[in-house]
Amino acid sequence: MSSKPPVVLFEQPQLTNEKKYDPFIFTDILADYSGKHQIPIIHFWTMTNELVLGMQDTRVTHLSDAIQSVRKNDYHPVVRNSGGLAVVADEGILNFSIILPQEFTNQTSINHGYETMKDIISNALSSWDATVESFEVTDSYCPGEFDLSINQKKFAGIAQRRIKKGLGIMIYISINGNQEKRGELVKEFYLSGLKEDFGKEPFPPVNPDSMKNLSDLLSEDLSVERVKSLIIGAVSQTFVFDKTAQQQFEMFLDSVELKETYDKGFKRMEQRNEGITTILKETN
């Protein structure tokens, strides 16, 4: 019998704009489940051409202009249910969370979650001769103290959020695709929304060249699926993917309880996005 603590896996397939609220609704649901059942959860998700905004982003001076710039670039805006600033989510970006029960985290410092995620990513990339560093890339989009970089170029950003009975440690990883276009998208959002105040705190002076894809930094044609596998391998060094726990979790995903909780979460996300939904209707 393994001495490693069990963990379960939740993978969401490529989410279209019609399902844009799903990963944020499920983050809360998974945190509650993790706390109740005392089991960590690994959550993977990708989206199709979304600009994910923090609540702060909805306070730019010219929000309507900013939202129109997003649509002009064939992306869809969505406001998440947590803090931070704008990040891009499309087919070349992997979003990954490890959700820990509250009891696993009570005795740790605020930085422990960030360090845990950095260690997972470093272990996942250990086959390459590359050093993953963590420091704030101030002219990237959504800059933070635990931005992850290789050769001074950011490829990922980490956030954490204490939710109900759990702690969610979340990362977005730019794996492939047009990263320069992503940077230009976010820069244009802030230029349109702030005009002459572009770069004024708390919003970043986005430089599209400050971020690169992991594929480019490692000189390897990486897919999202391959990076998922590498992360699962890294997680397996600390946790064991438990079949019984996974089966119980799958039953929960099909339950009436989940549907009721999901519906409540959907209504909350609708309310959070009312402002940009109104703008989109008015400008179509």
Image: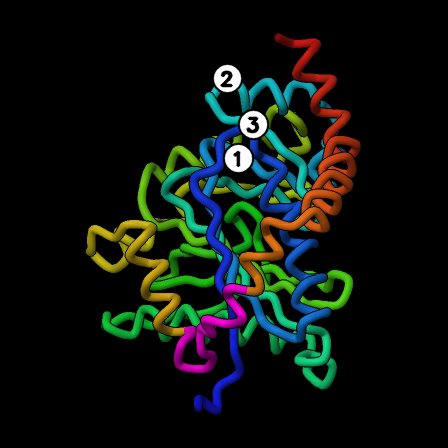
As for residue 246 lying within the magenta part, the answer is yes
What residue would you read off at disc 2?
Answer: 72
Residue 186: numbered disc: 1
| Mark 3, secondary structure of its residue | helix
Q: Mark 3 vs mark 2: give the one in front.
A: 3
Residue depicted at x 61% and y 59%: 159
* Whether residue 10 is situated above or below residue 264 in the rendered picture: below
Residue depicted at x 73% and y 31%: 273
Whether residue 151 sits left or right of residue 159 in the image: it is left
The quarter holding residue 193 reads top right
Q: Where does the magenta region start and end? A: 235-247
Whether residue 9 sits left or right of residue 174 in the image: it is right
Residue depicted at x 28% and y 70%: 130
At label 2, counting other C-alpha atoms closer than 10 Å, the crowd grade (few under 14, some 14-19, many 20 or more) is few
Q: Position of residue 246 (x, y in %)?
A: 50, 66
Question: Of marks 2 and 1, which one's residue comes earlier in the chain?
Answer: 2
Whether residue 10 sits left or right of residue 68 in the image: it is left
As for residue 24 lying within the magenta part, the answer is no
Q: Position of residue 170 (x, y in %)?
A: 56, 59
Q: Give amino acid for label 2.
A: Lys
At label 3, counting other C-alpha atoms closer than 10 Å, the crowd grade (few under 14, some 14-19, many 20 or more) is few
Calculate the distance from the C-alpha at mark 3 to the C-alpha at mark 1. 22 Å
What residue would you read off at disc 3?
Answer: 18
Depth order, front residue of 249/161: 249
Q: Mark 3 vs mark 1: give the one in front.
A: 3
| Mark 2, secondary structure of its residue | helix
Q: Position of residue 142 (x, y in %)?
A: 58, 49
| Mark 1, secondary structure of its residue | helix
